[in-house]
Amino acid sequence: MGKASEFLRAARGEIIALETLLTSIPAIAPEGGGDGEEKKCRALENWLREKGFTNIERFEAPDSRVSAGVRPSLVVTIPGLDDSQRVWVMAHMDVVPVGDPKLWNTDPWKLVEKDGRIYGRGVEDNQQGLCSAAFAALYFIKNGITPARTVKLLFVADEENGSDYGAVWLIHNTSLFRKNDLVLIPDGGDSEGRTIEIAEKNLLWLRVHVMGKQTHGSRPDSGANACLAASALSLKLNGLEKVFNKRDALFTPDYSTFQPTKREKNVDSINIIPGEDTFCMDCRILPCYKLADVLTEVDKCCHEVEAEYGVKVEYTTPQKSESPATPVNAPVAQKLAAAIKKVHGIDAEFIGIGGGTVGAELRREGIDAVVWSTLDDQAHQPNEYCVIDNLIKDSETLIEFFAN
């Protein structure tokens, strides 16, 4: 590992140069007003070939909304001593928009280095993971070393907007992945590099539409108050936290949450009792529960409110996702924990999260995936930065991960 550390320290300038190149090419999805990843992908592929990578494949998800007509992803292969079980590192090329430019101290698309940090949109999310993977692989290329297992670097499109044109498209339209592959996603973690995410809560979003009868504010007896019924229903749904009440220390918070969030406009005047009301729920549910069972309870709550308030309730599920956990004893989890111990000198901690990652898509296909990196959690923030030493340490950890 001393040789790997020496290689990466010597490559510090090249690492910053790659970050500079990638930052200068906005890769924003059409949902954010951008034109996709084509230009950034082409620049990255040219860089990889210039550095000596030869086994590069390009995969294109059709998307008529962007000028290229496709959303490209790259797969870089470094053949290993054993090809029966491949090691993947999956990073994404797309970034989110800058938000309010007045909140930035520097130009978001021009990398600035200061006090051991580099600033710019995308430098941490997810170019830190992309660059750490690229330079870990470059270590093997430049030193003529064959990794223990075949290494696959996957640089995907469309992670920031659901992955339909990236990881999800690749899973369902190619045969890239095998069931026994080991997949690391360097797109989440903590400032020590200690936590390995192996599970996600099941995700359920509800958009609930309550239909009653509009009437004058002075005559509630002649109508059916949809706002009142919607309020009662939101409380009932929140009460499902007491029905699905198991706890799991893997997660923070360690319980399932059913939270009312967005409420849509109903009437224009205070003296009108609304005949329709719409609200939303964000539910994050421990993976020990099936969403089908949760929705059965949601239906019960809706029927009870309909009967009590004389209204009709309909709902949709804008997002619905469930996935199994990667076992703690899975090879990818244990190999990564051993690499963290050797490079960082700390014991890894396995965690679950309430948010969603592409890891869930892989786990649903029976492929064990983990999410890990050493970062300050700058994703989507103004003045986003990456700690250069974190990137280098991550790359060193990946070298160890590939070598054994």
Image: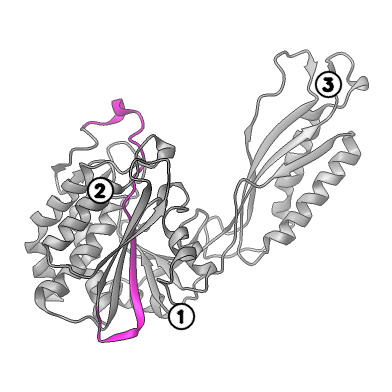
Mark found first going from the N terminus, 2 or 1? 2
From the viewer's side, name the closer residue of 364 and 267.
Answer: 364
Is residue 63 in view from this perspective? yes
Callouts 2 and 3 close, C-beta under 8 Å: no
Left or right: 224 in relation to 264: right
Q: Is residue 217 above or below residue 395?
A: above
Amino acid type, callout 1: Asn
Q: Is residue 130 above or below residue 78?
A: above
Q: Residue furthest left?
A: 10
The residue beneath circle 1 is 329
Look at discs 1 and 3 and give the one toward the viewer: 3
Amino acid type, callout 3: Gln
What mark, if any, has residue 214 been given in the picture? 3
- Residue 134, quarter of picture: bottom left
Q: How many angstroms separate mark 2 from mark 3 (CA)?
A: 54 Å
Circle 1 crowding by C-alpha within 10 Å: few under 14, some 14–19, many from 20: few
- In what element is the residue under mark 2? helix
Which quadrant, please, contains the C terminus? Answer: bottom left
What mark, if any, has residue 40 been given in the picture? 2
Residue under the point 21% across and 54% down = 44
Callouts 1 and 3 close, C-beta under 8 Å: no
